Image (tube, helix red, strand yellow):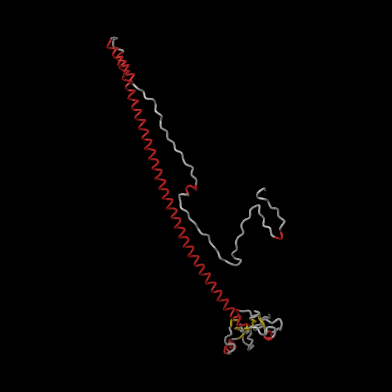
Amino acid sequence: MAQAASKTCEICVSAYGSQYCLECEQYFCENCKTFHKRQTVTKNHQFQSSSDIIPEGKSKCKDHNEDVSFVCNTCNVAVCSSCVTGSHKGHAFSKLMDSITQLKEKNTKDLRIKVQEATQNIKTMEESIKAFDVKVEVVVKAITEEGTKIKAMVDKCVAQMIASVKDQSRTEKNKLTKIMADSKMDLKAGSDIGNKIYELEKTRNDGQLLQSLQKLTDDIAKLTIEPIPEFPNIQYTAKPVIDNDIKQLFGIFKISEVRTQYSGNREKELPKPKSDDEQEMKPKNQGKYLLRCEVCG
């Protein structure tokens, strides 16, 4: 591949070659470019500023040392005119520049389609992420509301249990209070009898005293002292509760995993981490590792 030596117009060989014909691979001045574009054969040639390109010489056919100007569509290779009538005779051909132009257009179109597809995919994913965030907030709100409801139910249950404890304990306490009041009445009756005995000690010993003492004997016999009752007891036995028991009160949520359909080398399944007892044995290294049995060690 020979490189051009200068930027002098290769047509008039006098003016500065400010323009470069991509098809002819030659430098043109502004005047020669104008004449070049007027010719029927070359009017569709494309030009580019010579300052923006470093042209290379035309490719040579390795068999005939001629410039390649055609593409053998049958063999998909660039060929020269001698190849057309020689080893590639009877094949389908197209002009090299036409094939290059078609490939450029195809590549530009295919790239544009992929860029549009990628842009649309990104837009769709952004919208999906926003929608997913909204769904997450909905689930979080539902869990919070359910938790608040369960807390209210727990508070209500606690209040009811405390009220029941107080009611039942008040009933038993009232029983004890009544028994204690009866015991106080018995004690007062005994105290009254004691006072009567004390008063009788001051009287003379006669028949009247005897009758009074006999009556006191009957009163003492009628006086009953109730035994101490079995006092009530209260205790609370808590049930063993674990986190999973609490979770059973709530509903469940499920998040589906992201599924990718990427192809090529960019997206690969990551290898699973190996345990300490596992070793990756490649064919060339097979037999170089000792393995441990997980059963017998």
Q: Residue 112: percent from the left, percent from the top?
A: 54, 74
Q: Is residue 40 left or right of residue 161?
A: right
Residue 224 vs residue 34, the one in the foreground: 224
Quadrant holding the N terminus: bottom right
Q: Decide: is 24 above or below 140.
A: below
Q: Is residue 213 left or right of residue 61?
A: left
Q: Residue 214: percent from the left, percent from the top?
A: 31, 14
Say how many tags the image has: 0
Q: Decide: is 227 above or below 10.
A: above
Q: Residue at 71% of width from left, 82% of height from top?
A: 63
Residue 267 vs residue 218, the one in the foreground: 218
Q: Decide: is 229 above or below 73.
A: above
Q: Residue 68: percent from the left, percent from the top?
A: 66, 83
**Residue 42 sits in which quadrant?**
bottom right
Q: Is residue 116 left or right of residue 231?
A: right
Residue 13 vs residue 63, the one in the foreground: 63
Q: Residue at 49% of width from left, 56% of height from top?
A: 254
**Residue 181 sits in which quadrant?**
top left
Q: Decide: is 112 above or below 269.
A: below
